[in-house]
Amino acid sequence: MLTLALFALLATATAYIWPSPQFEALDEMRFEQPLAGFVNPCDLFIFDGSRKSGRADSADWIRTAYHDMATHNVKDGTGGLGRLDPFLGRDGATRGDAGDGFQNTINVLAGQSNRYVSIADVVALGAVIAVENCGGPEIAFRGGRVDATEPNAPGVPQPQESLDSHIASFARQGFTQTEMIGLVACGHTFGGVQHAPFPDIVPELNDPNSTESVAHFDSSFVNFDNNIATEYISGTTQNPLVVGLNDTTNSDKRIFGSDGNVTMSSFANSPELFASTCAELFAKMIDTVPRGVQLTDVVTPLPVKPIIAGFDLDGDTLRLGGRVRLWNMTQDTAGTVRLLWDDHVGGTNNITLPFGGGFTNSGGRNTGVYYTFSTTPSDSLSIDAAAGITQMRFTVNDKLEDQGGLGFLLPDGVVISTSSCIDFDFNGSITGHLDLAVRNTITPTRVFIEAETSDDSGRPIVVEIEVPRPSEAATANATYSIWSVQLNSDQQFNFYTVGAELDGGGKLLGPHQFFDFAPC
């Protein structure tokens, strides 16, 4: 079964009205959180199965996001989140990004990127998910970051630098002195300093529960809380950047005390103030991007979100596979869920959807349930191709859900045909063809495929493949004709989107599909 997003008429509005491939992808990453398993439990460090290293993925992810942003210059607009990826780990030691935490982070996060969610977006999301799933506050998230084509100049503050240098560095990034204190404290509620990249700060600890000799910033280094402040104010802190033997590298001591401990005292006295301040500062941090990068609106979950897992033509039948996600609901509160769809001949059809499971994350803050379009997840809903489908609606516990009367548009003008096939030889080269079924009632001027692949740096890119107009279109049935393109070894990709430009200026941009076909 193909994994698809939707065919949709392109829209210029930025509001999240379904279908919107970019917001759908951002919504899934942000709220369904496929990355959350890497920070659950919060002391998980996936590169050490014993969980005795003293390290945690959460700390690496937060540190990576800050370092990615830290070269931003508010005056000239250069630098900002997106400037390092995917260059982290290649020359980190020369830019202040010491240690393997950055490369470890990219090794995990980069694979989650796609044409709609950049590597930089995933790095920002990594910080959000780490904080939220380990006791921290909810952080506003926007998408639209652009991956760098080359690494930026050095600029990450170093522990041996003076207080004046740190104040100037954070000011260049766009943060006041008070915000500098807050952001350092917020970031340092996780993690610590590792011996290997910083032997002058942390000695070998010879601790069986910290095999990589990590001196932690506070006593609860894998959870978000205000212990970073309470322990500092009480004088019980073991933070190696406060009480280290070499006072030259005690940068947290200088930063925290730079306003007479006013800010840190307020954090120690109020965990609520600390959490709300960190939510604001983390959001500002991940929204610090190079000038000219336009971020989306804050991503918010749709109350009712269709998720298309298959939409293709099989003989005289359109097959629709997928499910609908109901936000902030349980099986009990959702009650009976029905899918209604309109067709081309004036009919309205409906089925009752079976329960398909649920999820919860961010400490229970995010919850949702799924109802599938068929009796079993591996099946699909069969729709007569001649009647087709134009839009969907849902009823949830007898309440109509149709995006305020807009419906959930599902045009069927161009879909993939199950007659497509693919073969691989022992060298990994491919042959085969993609067949696109074009509804005979539309008149496309061109049909194309946008193939998703990656460049040499691992960034997602899109390559367009023209589908030639057939001299005599093969007829799939009385409703659809087939446009076909041969594939070759130069056209290797994992995901693709089909599209068409229509006579009269309209455009259909097609599904985000997984490259998975039967052998020829």
Image: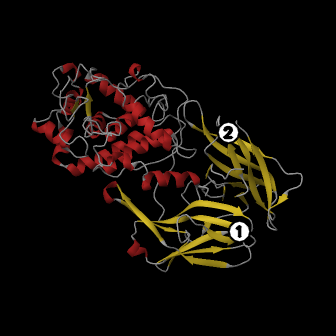
The quadrant where residue 350 appears? bottom right
In the image, residue 458 sits, relative to residue 392, either above or below, namely above
Q: CA distance from mark 1 to mark 2?
A: 32 Å
Q: Nearer the viewer, residue 117 or 160?
A: 117
Q: Are marks 1 and 2 in contact (CB under 8 Å)?
A: no
Relative horizontal placement of residue 312, taking residue 188 as reference (left or right)? right
What is the crowding at mark 1: few (fewer than 14 residues within 10 Å), some, or many (at least 20)?
some
Q: Quadrant of the N terminus?
A: bottom right
In the image, residue 171 sits, relative to residue 397, either above or below, namely above
Determine whether the residue tagged by mark 1 lies in a helix, strand or loop: strand
Q: Nearer the viewer, mark 1 or mark 2?
A: 2
Q: Could you say where residue 310 lies in the image, as x and y percent from the top left?
A: 61, 60
Q: Tell which residue pokes out farthest to the front in this image.
A: 426
Type of amino acid under label 2: Asp
* Residue visible at 54% across and 57% down in the picture: 15
Relative horizontal placement of residue 37, taking residue 485 as reference (left or right)? left
Question: Badge 2 is on which residue?
Answer: 425
- Mark toward the start of the polypeptide (1 vs 2): 1
Q: Which mark is residue 317?
A: 1
Q: Could you say where residue 173 lies in the image, as x and y percent from the top left?
A: 39, 31
In the image, residue 389 sits, relative to residue 129, either above or below, namely below
* Residue visible at 53% across and 42% down in the picture: 294
Relative horizontal placement of residue 14, taking residue 465 as reference (left or right)? left
